[in-house]
Amino acid sequence: MERRHFLHRAGLVGAGFTILPSGFLRGQNAPSNKLNIALIGAHGRGLAHWDSLAGENLVALCDVHDGHLALALERFPKAKTYKDWRRCLDHPGLDAVVICTTDHTHAFIANWAMNRNLHVYCEKPLAITVEEARLVRAKWLTKRDKLATQVGMQRHALPNFNRVSELIRDGAIGDLKSVSAWGNRQIRRQGYFPAAGSPPAGFDYDLWLGPSPEHPYNPAYFAGKPGMNCLEWNMFWDFGCGQIGDMGSHTMDLVWNAIDAKVPTSISAKGETFNPDVTPVECESHFDHPANEWRGPIRVSWYQGGVMPRSPKPFIDLEKISHGAIFKGSRGFLIADFESRMIIPFGDDADLGYYKRRGKGELLPDVGPFQKQWFDACRDPGRSTACDFGYSADMIEQMLLGLVAYRVGAKIEYNSETGTITNHESANQYLRKSYRDGWSMEG
Ligand SMILES: NC(=O)c1ccc[n+]([C@@H]2O[C@H](COP(=O)([O-])OP(=O)(O)OC[C@H]3O[C@@H](n4cnc5c(N)ncnc54)[C@H](O)[C@@H]3O)[C@@H](O)[C@H]2O)c1
C-alpha cells in the first residue's frame, strides 16, 4: 500500500503519530512515494500544471470537453478519463486533486474533495460568494491537520512578496495605516450572450453550467486562448466574480501576505452602474480591519478597472503599474508590483534612521516552486503551504464582501463570527446565490 495511504487509512497522519513500518522510509522521489492525482479541468490553465504533474502519478483526467480530454490523454496516456467531476472524485486510490475548472465550480469541487480526504490545489478564486468561501474554510478547519491545500496564487513564490512583508512588519514606513491595491484590466460586456448554435459534439454544456442557473449556449464563452479563456466568462455573475477574483486574487495576495489580517468588520464600495448580468469593471472597495498584535487598525482598499488610488508624489505615476499596491505608514509609503518595491519616506530630509534592516540570516525563507510546496505538504501534511484554504478563504471573503457593498450601495457592518451583515438586513441575500436543482456544496 502506498505510504501516505497506509498512514491515512490507519488514521495516523495528523494524530501526532510518526510510526513508519520498516521499508516505508523511502527517498522523496521513489516511485512508491508518488501521489495519485486527478486533474479536473484538463486543458486551458490545466496545461500550466502538466509538467509538474508529470512527476507524480496522474491517474485521472476530468473535462467537460472530449477534445480537451483527448489532448491531455496524449500527455498522460495511462490516466482514466471522466466528464463529470463528481464521478472523478471517486476514482479509486486518489490522494489529491488539482482544480482548473471555471470559477463557479471551484468551491464545490474543493469541498467535495475535502469530504473525501483528498489534498486540494485549486485555481483562484477559491470561491465566488461569501458563503462559498466560509463553507470551504469551515471544512478545511476540520481537516487542516491531514490535508494539504493551496490556491493558485503562484506569484506568492516571488521573493518580492516576502521582502514587502519584512519591510512593512519591520517598520520601514513606520506604523502601517492603510494599504491600497489595484488592477487595471478592463473587459466590458453588456450581458449574457444570446443563444447561438449548439455546443460542439463532445462538449457537455450542461455539465459546464454545473450549479449555475441556465444560460443559453454561445460559442463566445469559449473563444479565448488556452489559459486565457477565463477572460471570456469570469465577469458574469453566474460564472465568476470579475477582476476582484481574477487579478484581485493575485494582487491582494501581495498585500495579504504583509498585513496579517482576517475578515473586515466594515466595508464600503462604489463603482459603475449595477448590471444584473455582469460584475463591475470600474469599482473601488474599502475594508476596515481591526488592530492585531503588531499594528493598529487599518483600511485596505481595492481599485479596479481604471479607478486608482492617489499617488503620494506628482512624479510617481501609479498608472504605469498595471497591478500593484501602495502601503501608507506613519513615516512613508511603500509602492510595489509583483517583482519590485520602493520606499518613499515622508519629508525631503527623511533619513530612515528609525528603521533597522534585517540581517541576511533573518530574512523570511523562500517559498520555492509553488506547486512543489503543495506536493511536499501532501506527502507530509505537517508542512505548511503559503496559500492554504485558511489564508485564501479569508482573503477572498474580504474581496467578495466588496461586491456585496457595491450591490447595496451602502457601508455594511459585518460580523465575521456569524457571517452576517448587521446593519443592512437585505444585504445578506447577496452573501450567497442559489444553485440549480441537484447541485449542493455538500456531497
Ligand atoms: N493562477 C493563474 O495565474 C491562472 C491563470 C489562468 C487561469 N487561472 C484560473 O484557471 C481557471 C480556468 O481558466 P481557463 O482560462 O483555463 O478556463 P477554460 O474555460 O479554458 O477552462 C479550463 C478547462 O476546464 C474545463 N472545464 C470547464 N468547466 C469544467 C467542469 N465543470 N468540469 C470539468 N472540466 C471543466 C474546460 O473544458 C477547459 O479544458 C479559472 O478559474 C482561472 O481563474 C489561473
Image (cartoon, grey):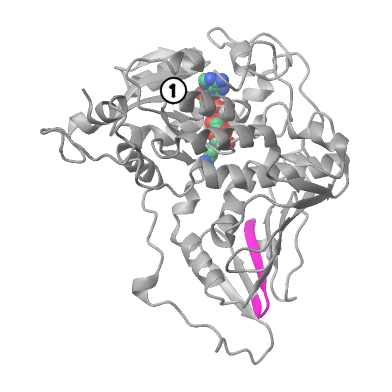
> 59 and 365: which one is in front?
365
Q: Is 384 placed above or below 301 here?
A: above
- Type of secondary structure dominating the magenta stretch: strand
Where does the image place residue 240, in percent across and percent down from the top left? Answer: 67, 32
Magenta region = 323-332
Q: Name the image quarter holding the N terminus.
A: top left
Q: Which residue, given by chain and number where applicable, does mark 1 sit on?
A: 116
Q: Name the image quarter holding the C terminus.
A: top right
- With 179 as the anchor, is 51 left or right in this view? left
Q: Residue furthest left?
A: 22
- With 254 as the anchor, is 398 left or right in this view? right
Instruction: Say what amino acid the circle numbered 1 marks.
Output: Arg
Say which residue appears at 81% left-offset and 49% top-offset: 269
Say which residue appears at 70% left-offset and 40% top-offset: 418
Where does the image place residue 32, in percent across and percent down from the top left? Answer: 19, 29
- With 224 as the anchor, is 303 left or right in this view? right
